[in-house]
Amino acid sequence: MTRNLIHSTFASLAIALLGLASLSAASFDAPKKALEETVLELIEVLHADNNEHDYNEKRDQIIEILNKSFSFDIIIQRALGRNWNKLDEKQKNQVTLLVTDLVLRTYTRELKNGPKPKLKFGKATALTESESKIEIASKVVLKDSEINLSYRLANIKDRGWQVYDVLVEGISMVSNYRKQFDEHFQKKSAADLIDLLKNKLEEAQR
């Protein structure tokens, strides 16, 4: 094989790989756009008025909006990890509802406080070779600060692209919760966890 032929072969391969990369990036446009629309819609709802009891009054609407792009049941199961099987069906439902409310209160409080935040979304990048999982980086620009949020999504059967983890300044919400749950179950039970979550939710409502 001559040198010119070798160069030609590598050039063709490089062009083909670039073409595949472009196709991959384009294939992530839809989940990125859907996520952006979900978060923007949430912000519009949160800033529709200045009612301090906004979350309580708009809880169902907030959950309906976020369910378009977020799978909270999967987020919570991943956060509990091996501890998920220590709960019976009733406890699983209770924990899912309680943790969902706690997470949403924290998440929406950050987006609601002060002036309406500005969002900047970056490109979606594949996390796996099969491209079944992606990460979408974003920045939430507040009045005096900037928060880096990265959303990790999986292409879930019968659901499409859904968020299964959120990284705040590089720290995984799922990993952070899992550590706390692991520590809890070393000494305490599922019933104790439900009581703890209820107390935390009561505190958050004050």
Image (cartoon, grey):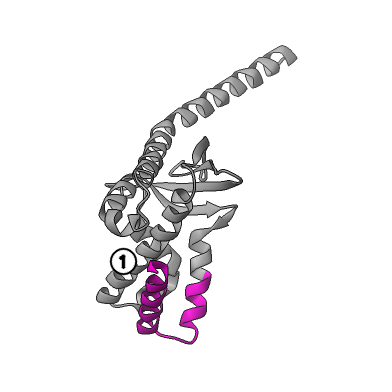
Q: Residues within 10 Å of mark 1 (few under 14, many from 20)?
A: some
Which residue reaches farthest right? Answer: 3
Residue at mark 1 = 97
Look at 53% across and 53% down and name the residue there: 167
The answer to whether 95 appears left or right of 17 in the picture is: left
Main SS, magenta region, reads helix
Which residue reaches farthest bottom? Answer: 187
Q: Is residue 49 above or below residue 18?
A: below
Residue 191 picture location, percent across and down? 35, 83
Look at 48% across and 47% down and name the residue there: 151
Displayed quadrant of residue 30: top left
Q: Amino acid at mark 1?
A: Leu
In reply to whether residue 90 is colored magenta, the answer given is: no
Residue 60 picture location, percent across and down? 26, 55
Residue 153 picture location, percent across and down? 43, 47
Question: Magenta region: which residues?
Answer: 179-206
Label 1 residue SS: helix
- Image quarter in which the C terminus is found: bottom left
- Image quarter in which the N terminus is found: top right
Q: Who is closer to the viewer here, 149 or 204? A: 204
Q: Who is closer to the viewer here, 51 or 200? A: 51
Q: Who is closer to the viewer here, 122 or 74? A: 122
Look at 37% across and 73% down and name the residue there: 202
Residue 147 picture location, percent across and down? 57, 48
In reply to whether residue 203 is colored magenta, the answer given is: yes
Displayed quadrant of residue 13: top right
Look at 38% across and 67% down and name the residue there: 205
The answer to whether 101 appears left or right of 19 in the picture is: left
